[in-house]
Amino acid sequence: MNLEDFLYFIGEKIEHLAWMIIRGIISFFNPKPSEKPPSHRFISKFLKKGFTVHELVSLYLQIVFLLYLFSAFSLVVLTREVVLVGILSLGYLLYLRYYLKRYSGFLIEPEPYRVFYTYVSLISSFSFVGYVVLKKAKISPYLYYSFLGLIAILVIVFWVYFKRKFGRDYTYGVVEEVKNDLVRVFVHDDISANVKPDVYWLPAVPDAEPGRVVKVLVENRAFRGARPVRILEIYLSQSSQSSTEPKNATE
């Protein structure tokens, strides 16, 4: 290969790389819903057998949010640099927006998850950045405590809004087994009912057969996730465990 061909080859590679970067930036800031579910192979290893893509996406959102909280808290304690905390927060919020637009369609009920993680992340980012700014400004302690009070109010107001808008005392599950007077029901992760994904043994009811979707009453517990307690309704069979949206009720 002579020099001219070599330079032409290098030019093509650079042009191809540049277009890949441009397409990646456009895709990041203007994401389209994905037709394929995320793999997250490392995280999927920690999920119990039988859990679905819904649980995978939900768990990933939790992990990313916790990593952001840990990273932001570390920067606040170690550096107290507004720019670093601001860049981290902005990067996290942009990535959260990208991920929700890209993969929230794989959640059984996406809107509560979008609202919860978006607003909790915004409040968290405002808290970290505001704290560093106030510390740098060396303002009056009264203003500092007022800021902390404002954050507490924002958290309470959002929690009340979320519970009124999306909260409910029931969830849906899929019957896996009937044994004597008990029914084993698989319940998906449900942020609206504050239920974690798991298999629960509930009192048996008539017509509860394997494969059927059931509406389940949940009992709230202070500082803990709600727990399914009994079956309220039974629906027609579902072809897959990946969805618990009820069909026509049989009773």
Image (cartoon, rainbow, N blue to C red):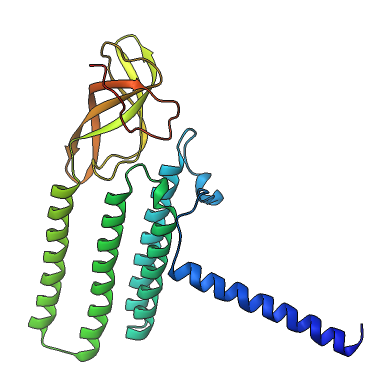
Relative side of 93 to 23, left or right:
left
- Looking at the image, can residue 72 be seen? yes
Residue occupying image coordinates x 18% and y 44%:
167
Q: Quadrant of residue 20?
A: bottom right
Q: Is residue 20 above or below residue 240?
A: below
Which residue in the rendered view is the most extreme toward the right? 1
Q: Quadrant of residue 199?
A: top left
Relative side of 7 to 168, left or right:
right
- Looking at the image, can residue 81 be seen? no
Quarter of the image where the C terminus is located: top left
Q: Is residue 251 above or below residue 101?
A: above
Pick whichever, 79 or 6, lies toward us: 6
Q: Percent x, y for residue 44?
A: 51, 45
Relative side of 146 to 246, left or right:
left
- Number of marks drawn: 0
Q: Is residue 148 above or below residue 37?
A: below
Residue occupying image coordinates x 18% and y 36%:
169
Relative side of 16 to 178, left or right:
right
Q: Percent x, y for residue 10?
A: 77, 82
Residue occupying image coordinates x 86% and y 89%:
4
Which residue in the rendered view is the most extreme toward the left? 142
Q: Percent x, y for residue 96?
A: 38, 63
Quarter of the image where the N terminus is located: bottom right
Residue occupying image coordinates x 49% and y 44%:
46
